[in-house]
Amino acid sequence: METNDKIKAVKKTINKLRPFLQADGGDVEFVRLEDDIVYVNVVGACVGCASLSFTLKDGIESLIMDEVEGIKEVRLADDSLNQML
């Protein structure tokens, strides 16, 4: 799958997840795709949430990897938030 096609597929998958996060006062935004790793930002209630690691790995990453061929991982683009995981 070409990079542009992967980006489109990742964004489509993220858009499926956003209503669930928004219902709890949070949100997720696509930042970039680099070396088959998706980088996202979380905002709102997701920042500082005790469940962020679970949401990122067992929710966002799991669904993206299931739906988009070749994705290796999903990481937070904001390094300061990565320290909280």
Image (spheres, rainbow, N blue to C red):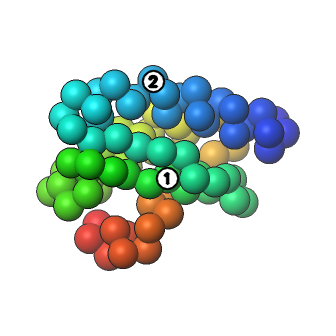
Q: Are marks 2 and 1 in contact (CB under 8 Å)?
A: no
Q: Which sits in the foreground, 48 or 58? A: 48
User: Measuring 36% from the left and 75% from the top, which residue is drawn there?
Assistant: 80
Q: Residues within 10 Å of mark 2 (few under 14, many from 20)?
A: few
Is the C terminus in the top left, top right, bottom left or bottom right quadrant?
bottom left
Is the N terminus in the top left, top right, bottom left or bottom right quadrant?
top right
User: Measuring 54% from the left and 46% from the top, which residue is drawn there?
Assistant: 30
59 relative to 2 in the view: left or right: left
Does the image show residue 56?
yes
Give the number of callouts: 2
The correct choice, above or below, for 77 with respect to 62 in the image is below
Quote the CA–CA distance across marks 2 and 1.
15 Å
Residue indicated by mark 2: 16
Residue indicated by mark 1: 40
* Image coords of residue 26 (percent x, y): 27, 42
The correct choice, above or below, for 50 with respect to 85 in the image is above
Q: Secondary structure at mark 2?
A: helix
State which tag comes first along the sequence, 2 or 1: 2
Mark 2: amino acid: Lys
Mark 1: amino acid: Val
User: Measuring 59% from the left and 34% from the top, which residue is drawn there?
Assistant: 11
Q: Image quarter for residue 37? A: bottom right
Q: Residues within 10 Å of mark 1 (few under 14, many from 20)?
A: many
* Image coords of residue 50 (percent x, y): 15, 56
Q: Residue lying furthest left in this view? A: 50
* Image coords of residue 24 (percent x, y): 19, 34
Does the image show residue 72?
no
11 relative to 61 in the view: left or right: right
Q: Image quarter for residue 39? A: bottom right
